[in-house]
Amino acid sequence: MTPSNTIAADPIPEPGITPGTGSQQKEPVNVLIVGVGGQGVIMVSKVLARLCQKSGFQVKQSEIHGMAKRGGAVFSHVRFGEQVWSPTIPAGKADILLALEWAEGLRWLRYLNPRKGTFICDTQRIVPPFACRNRKMGAEQTYARETPSVIFERVPNGYAIDASRMAEELGNIRVANTLLLGLLSTALEFSREEWQSVITEFVPPKTRELNRQAFLLGRNWVEKAIQEPGLPSEENTEKVFFDPQARPRIELEITESWCKGCDICVKMCPERCLRLNEGLVAELSDPEACTGCRVCEWLCPDFAIKLHLHPVQGNC
Amino acid sequence: MNEVCEARPMIGNEAIARGAWEAGVKVAAAYPGTPSTEILEYMGSYPSEDLHAQWSTNEKVACDVAIGASFEGVRAMTAMKHVGLNVASDALLSQSYIGVNGGLVLVVCDDPGIHSSQNEQDTRIFCQLAGVPVLEPADAQEALEFVKRAFDLSEQFDTPVVLRSTTRLCHTRSLVRTGERLEREPVGFLEDPQKNVMIPANARRRHPKLLERMNALKQHFDDPEWSRLEKGDPKFGVVTVGPVYTYVKEVLPGATILKLSSSFPLPEKTLREFCESMDRVFVVEELEPVIETAMQSMGLQVEGKELFPRIDEFSPEIVRQGFEKAGLLEVDENREEWEIQPMIRPPVLCAGCPHTTSYMALRALEARVAGDIGCYTLAAVEPLRAIDTTVAMGSSIANALGMAKAGCETKPIVATIGDSTFLHSGIPPLIDAVYNQANITVLLLDNQIVAMTGGQDHPGTGKTLRGEETVRIDYAEMAKACGVKWVRTIDSYDVAAMFKNLREAVDYPGVSMLISNRPCVLDPVKIKGEPLRIDAASCTGCQSCMNLGCPALSWSGEFHEGHNKVRIDPLACIGCTLCAQVCPTDCIRPVLQEAA
Ligand SMILES: Cc1ncc(C[n+]2csc(CCOP(=O)(O)OP(=O)(O)O)c2C)c(N)n1
Ligand code: SF4
Ligand code: SF4
């Protein structure tokens, strides 16, 4: 990144709330770090906060945990400068948005400063079970559709990097965070040595060398990205093997006289759309919910269930 | 870790613990609850010669423990989340009449915005009811100092003191200057039955004393050391307290501000003087209009909740919008709108969570399920969606009992309750159910930890807060002692045993208890076994495994007859085998076995 893009503030060491008007002071630097529970958002923000504090800035680092551990969205605000008031970054005021996962990066874009903000994002996709909920034939995941090039048209500075894959190739996917710190390091005015000494404080001694490599890999990647703009990959677009237009009509044929009411199909149906009627014979209670998965057809010990898929006219 | 007179970054909770240690606290007790949990964890990091720190079974017990220590003349503290005070309030409301011997401080942490709670009640209203003063620090440094001042205030005015924090303060890290510990000589127990024994005759005498005390405190808070006047723009003034102060400074750095330290009782003289010199006065406070209403009843003209909402967590934007509405700030045009829907990402049960099987079986059983509070509450949503009600901690068993006595339920009635919640407030309702001969099943979800709040020990883990070995409660024995005749324990990862035993349990006429036992996969140790793999050729995309809601499972991008095939993320999968047990085509196997 060019030096004009780097963000600086002058150090002052006084902690806590001190009286004063504050109107003359420089604005603090705002870094919003986001990701998914378990990815290490907190570790990344602790490294940054520690670095700022060592350099004599006032720092506030604020995060919400609690539910975060269980795969939810996690975010951490880091603000540093002469005087930091609010622990959270106002929307539209983040100088840097660092995202450890693609969709999470998109979620927080409104926090990015629309005039001079830098967006740094790992393109890895963590698809929650929630995104795989549609049971219709040929259904697509409900994951974010925007690709890096769409986003980069609108953000002042943008970097999309497949940090997780690069970390995996380096030997451990867990050092993706350090790799991203390498990227981040080029956007802030701390020296490479300062970054590396703080990272060393936070990583297990055995992984120091690996983390050093990851950090440098991320840092050097930025130089390349500047030389070859348009680097981000478009791998985010999903391939679909099934044409949802060709969705057939599903018919479930139950031969009542063969059914002995064993309840197996009712209990095993993944859509829970079967029941035993008053005569203890299986019936389709919720035809809308049936996806035609054939589990009942295969599991019925008496071959009483048969599934028919009727092609819809004109579609195939 | 107890170096003195230095500055280091701390989250608010750590600063509160540090303040308590510096204040010479001898006894600290709590039941975990987000966002307060870390306070006691940090207390436990100070030497045991300095203080006793413990987990209690619930907030009332913890509060009573602190009260007991205060009776003995030592400084004592308890910490809880806002709803914890509902549980502890019975003790607090009487202790307020009694007062203190050694300083007594209750740290209560509100959760505006309901980040991790069942409501967003405002603790300050409880303080008004109890007649105890409440201090509200704005950042971690103030939190440390206010804890120390709270203890002095408690002893000076013979009153319990509440320190109100919020999620934001609890979990924001900033630099804090620390001091030294003040060792106090224990005063010893003061025999004074008229003060310490709340029989009606004594309580009648103590009540006027409480009112006198409130009056004295009101005047005391007029002392300039309890509020800070920041002179700025002379046209309008802002009265504020707590972390909201920092948002006001963020958006109006040049405003005239009266920053209070306490929102109850209020320094009337100070407030009157402040208002006299101003054309317009704004009160900016999170949640309820406590200061605003009190100022209005003093006859002062203020603006507050019509500009700054009564719900949700404040932020610089929300405070800014309030001042925009008031006409004091230009509308911020510099906002970028993004029409992006990156999809919602709700929290889910962990891959391999032992609670999964219970709710899968309950859903299949079509039971009426009275739920409770813990990680397992996440089973209330799709795909498990097997919980019908969740009220408050420990409600499940008595809710189930009530459902049974209503007499119109056709489904089997099951109460599901976690191990820690059962110990917190599940035992009296269990006895109630036995005593009143209800036909219900209690499914005890024993994951051997308080998982929801980040993995704390409790009497069922056999370890203390400091990690020392102690007595371990045996739930089966306890249930039998309570009169439950049908008690069985099973492995949470055995799907067949879960289905079979649950069916037998609900068929049993009377109170039955099934204990589902397996450690949580996150705490106390992170469990990571060999991942499983799905044989893509045999996967028919039936989605049976997806019904578990395991976050290691997602679609692979391949289809069978139009159905999305499933893949397992090997980094997330812990190898619990639940998906393999439910797969109708038997295509989920350990990676190792396949290689062999
Ligand atoms: C009165 C009250 N105190 C504390 C809490 C915070 N809290 C929510 S769930 C929970 C404990 C859950 O533990 P357990 O029942 O063992 O379930 P687990 O999370 O381990 O599955 C706690 C302490 C609360 N919601 N209400
Ligand atoms: S933390 Fe433990 S109890 Fe909670 S969802 Fe994860 S595995 Fe289940
Ligand atoms: S074995 Fe199956 S259910 Fe268990 S963690 Fe792995 S993918 Fe999830």
Image (spheres, rainbow, N blue to C red):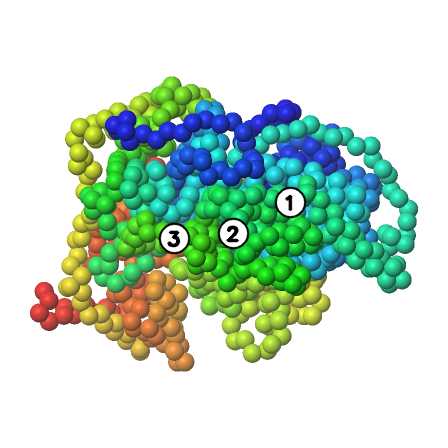
In the depicted view, which residue is nearer to us: B440 or B132? B132
Circle 1: element type: strand
Which structural element holds mark 3? loop
Residue A305 vertical position relative to residue B372 in the rendered view, above or below: below
Label 2–label 3 contact, CB within 8 A = no
- Which residue does the numbered mark 1 point to in the structure image? B227
Name the residue that disc number 3 marks. Answer: B330
Both labels 3 and 1 in a single chain: yes
**Does residue B538 sit above or below A305 in this rendering?**
above
Q: Residue at x 79, y 39 (%)?
A: B74
Q: Contact (CB < 8 A) between labels 3 and 1?
A: no
| Amino acid type of the residue that numbered disc 3 sits on in the rendered structure | Glu
**In the image, B409: left or right of A256?**
right
Same chain for marks 2 and 3? yes
Residue A215 location, quadrant: top left
Relative to residue B154, is residue B560 drawn left or right?
A: left
Q: Quadrant of the C terminus of chain B?
A: top left
Q: Nearer the viewer, mark 3 or mark 1?
A: 3
Tag shown at residue B473: none
Seen in the image, is B457 located left or right of residue A190? right
- Label 1 to label 2: alpha-carbon separation: 20 Å
Q: Amino acid at mark 1?
A: Ser
Q: Residue at coordinates 55% horizontally, 65% vertically from top-left?
A: B370
Q: Which mark is residue B235?
A: 2
**Marked residue chain, label 2:** B
Respond whether the residues carrying marks 1 and 2 are from the same subunit: yes
Kindly indicate whether the residue at mark 2 contacts the one at mark 1 (C-beta within 8 angstroms): no
